[in-house]
Image: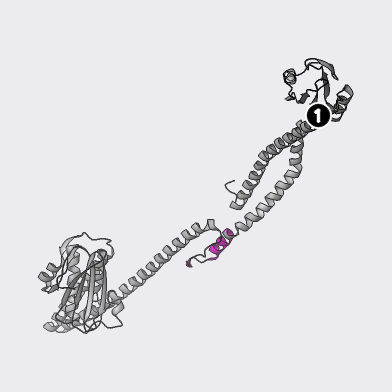
C-alpha cells in the first residue's frame, strides 16, 4: 500500500472507515428494533388481556383468540392464583415467580427461553399467555440482509461522494506539483499561498528554501563577478609594472651604466612586491571566518603608531596584527590620496566602536564612491588599489563593517566599525 498514491490510499481508508462504521450502526439498529418490537408486543398483549379482565370474559376460548393472533399458549389459574386449571399445552408447569407475583396482586412479565410470559390477576381467577419471539429473534438476520443490499448501495454512494470531495480537496496538491514540474531550475520566485490549509506549511518551507537558494545563487554570482574583477584587476596591475620593468631592463641591456633605469627597475620590483603581498594577504583574509581577538586600546594605538590626535577613548576586541594591517592601509590611503591634517574620532555605537578618519583632500570621485572597498578600485595615482579592500576584509573577519563618504565641508571620511569591550568619549555631545 505504501506504493499507492496519496489519493488512492485516502480512498481505500475512506471505504474501510465507512464499512467499519456500518457494523456498530447495524448493532445499534438491531437492538433498537428488538426493544421496540418487544415493547409493542408487550403493550398489545396487556391491552388485550386488560380488555378480557374488564369484561369478565376470561375463558379458554377468549385466551385461544389471543394465542391464535399472537401465537403461543394460554393458561387459567384458580381464584387463589396458585393452581392451573386450564392450559392449551400439555405441560401445566409455569415459570418460577408467577405464583408469587399473582398472590401479591402484581402482573408477571418475563422473557424465558425466547418466550414472553405475561400473567395478571383477575376477579374470576388469574390468567396469562406465553408468546414466542421468533420474529423478534429474526430481526438481526433480516437487518443483516437489508444492510447487505441497501446498505451496500448506500456505502458505495457515500464512498463516491467522498471520493469526489477528496479529489476536489486534493486538487491544489496536483496544481502545486504541476507548477513545480514546469518551473525551470533557475526560477526561484515564491509559490503562491495555497487554498488548502494543510499545504501551507509545506509551501512556506519550499518558499524559505527557494529564498535561501536564491540568496546563495546571488552570492555565487557576486563572488564569480568579484573573482573575474579580481583576476582582471590583478592582471592589469601586474602588466603595467612588468612592462615598465622590461623597458628598464632593455635600457640597462643597451646602457649598462644607466643608474636611472636601474632605479626605475627596482621601483617597479618594489611595486610588484607590494602588489603581490597585498594580493596574498587579501586571499588569506578571504579564507578566514573569524579573528583571534584580544582587547586593544584603539586610541593609544592610533596615537603611538601614527601620531594622530584622537577624539574619544575606546577598547576594541581585535587581532592586533590584522588591526594594525587595516590601520596601516587606512592611514596610508588617507595620506596618499587625501590631505593633511588627518582627524580621528572614536564613536561607540551598537555594542562596538566606529573609527572615523577624515582627511582634507578632494574626496572620492562620485563614480567610484560605491565601489571604493573593492580590489583595484582607485582614482588617479600609482597605488595598487588594495588598501581599502584590505581594510574591508579585516573588518569583515572581525564581524565589523566599513563606510566611506565625502564630507560636505570637503575631504573624505572612511569609517570602520569593530566590536568593542568598552568605550568612553570625552568632549563629544
Where is 144 relative to 389, above or below?
above
The image quarter containing residue 32 is top right
Q: What's the residue at 78%, 23% (across, down)?
A: 119
Seen from the viewer's position, the closer of residues 345 and 90 is 90
Q: Which residue is mark 1?
A: 50
**Image location of residue 274, percent across then percent down:** 19, 73
Residue 348 is one of the magenta-drawn residues: no
Whether residue 352 is visible: yes
- Decide if residue 185 is on the left or right side of residue 164: left
Residue at 74% of width from left, 41% of height from top? 148
- Farthest-out residue, top: 83
Above or below for 75 versus 427: above
Is disc 1 surrounded by few (<14), some (14 to 19) or many (20+) residues within 10 Å? some
Residue 101, position in %: x, y? 73, 21
Q: Position of residue 252 (x, y in %)?
A: 16, 82
- 408 on left or right of 17: left
Question: Hey, which quadrant is residue 376 in on the image?
Answer: bottom left
What residue do we see at 48% from left, 66% from top?
Answer: 190
Residue at the spot 31% in from the left edge and 82% down from the top edge: 367
| Residue 187 belongs to the span the image colors magenta | yes
345 or 324, nearer to the observer: 345
Q: Nearer the viewer, residue 290 or 39?
A: 39
Q: Is residue 268 visible?
A: no
- Which image quadrant: the C terminus? bottom left
- Which stretch did the figure color magenta? 173-189
Pick whichever, 408 or 189, lies toward us. 408
Position of residue 299 in the picture relative to residue 220 (left or right)? left
Q: Secondary structure at mark 1?
A: helix
Residue 182 image offset from top left, x and y in percent: 55, 65
Amino acid at each position: 500500500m505504501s506504493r499507492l498514491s496519496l489519493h488512492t490510499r485516502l480512498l481505500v481508508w475512506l471505504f474501510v472507515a465507512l464499512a467499519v462504521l456500518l457494523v456498530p450502526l447495524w448493532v445499534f439498529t438491531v437492538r433498537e428494533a428488538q426493544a421496540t418490537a418487544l415493547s409493542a408486543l408487550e403493550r398489545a398483549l396487556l391491552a388485550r388481556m386488560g380488555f378480557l379482565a374488564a369484561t369478565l370474559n376470561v375463558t379458554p376460548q377468549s385466551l385461544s383468540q389471543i394465542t391464535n393472533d399472537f401465537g403461543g399458549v394460554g393458561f387459567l389459574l384458580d381464584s387463589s392464583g396458585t393452581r392451573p386449571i386450564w392450559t392449551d399445552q400439555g405441560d401445566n408447569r409455569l415459570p418460577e415467580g408467577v405464583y408469587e407475583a399473582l398472590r401479591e396482586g402484581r402482573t408477571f412479565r418475563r422473557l424465558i427461553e425466547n418466550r414472553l410470559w405475561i400473567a395478571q390477576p383477575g376477579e374470576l381467577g388469574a390468567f396469562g399467555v406465553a408468546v414466542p419471539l421468533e420474529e423478534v429473534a429474526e430481526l438481526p438476520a433480516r437487518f443483516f440482509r437489508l444492510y447487505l443490499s441497501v446498505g451496500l448501495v448506500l456505502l458505495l454512494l457515500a464512498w463516491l461522494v467522498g471520493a469526489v470531495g477528496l479529489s476536489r480537496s486534493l486538487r491544489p496538491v496536483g496544481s502545486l506539483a504541476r507548477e513545480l514540474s514546469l518551473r525551470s531550475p533557475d526560477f526561484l520566485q515564491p509559490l503562491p499561498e495555497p487554498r488548502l490549509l494543510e499545504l501551507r506549511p509545506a509551501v512556506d518551507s519550499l518558499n524559505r528554501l527557494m529564498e535561501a537558494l536564491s540568496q546563495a545563487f546571488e552570492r555565487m554570482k557576486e563572488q564569480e563577478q568579484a573573482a573575474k574583477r579580481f583576476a582582471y584587476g590583478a592582471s592589469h596591475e601586474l602588466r603595467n609594472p612588468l612592462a615598465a620593468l622590461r623597458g628598464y631592463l632593455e635600457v640597462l641591456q643597451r646602457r649598462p651604466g644607466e643608474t636611472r633605469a636601474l632605479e626605475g627597475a627596482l621601483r617597479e620590483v618594489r611595486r610588484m612586491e607590494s602588489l603581490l603581498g597585498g594580493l596574498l594577504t587579501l586571499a588569506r583574509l578571504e579564507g578566514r571566518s573569524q579573528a583571534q581577538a584580544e582587547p586593544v586600546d584603539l586610541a593609544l594605538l592610533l596615537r603611538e603608531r601614527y601620531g594622530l590626535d584622537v577624539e574619544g577613548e575606546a577598547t576594541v576586541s581585535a587581532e592586533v596584527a590584522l588591526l594594525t594591517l587595516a590601520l596601516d592601509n587606512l592611514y596610508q590611503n588617507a595620506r596618499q590620496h587625501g590631505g593633511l591634517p588627518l582627524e580621528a574620532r572614536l564613536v561607540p555605537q551598537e555594542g562596538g566602536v566606529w573609527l572615523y578618519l577624515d582627511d582634507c583632500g578632494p574626496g572620492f570621485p562620485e563614480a567610484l564612491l560605491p565601489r571604493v572597498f573593492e580590489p583595484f578600485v582607485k582614482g588617479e595615482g600609482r597605488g595598487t588599489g588594495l588598501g581599502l579592500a584590505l581594510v574591508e576584509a579585516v573588518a569583515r573577519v572581525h564581524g565589523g563593517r566599513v563606510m566611506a563618504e565625502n564630507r560636505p565641508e570637503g575631504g573624505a571620511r572612511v569609517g570602520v566599525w569593530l566590536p568593542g569591550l568598552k568605550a568612553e568619549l570625552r568632549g563629544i555631545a
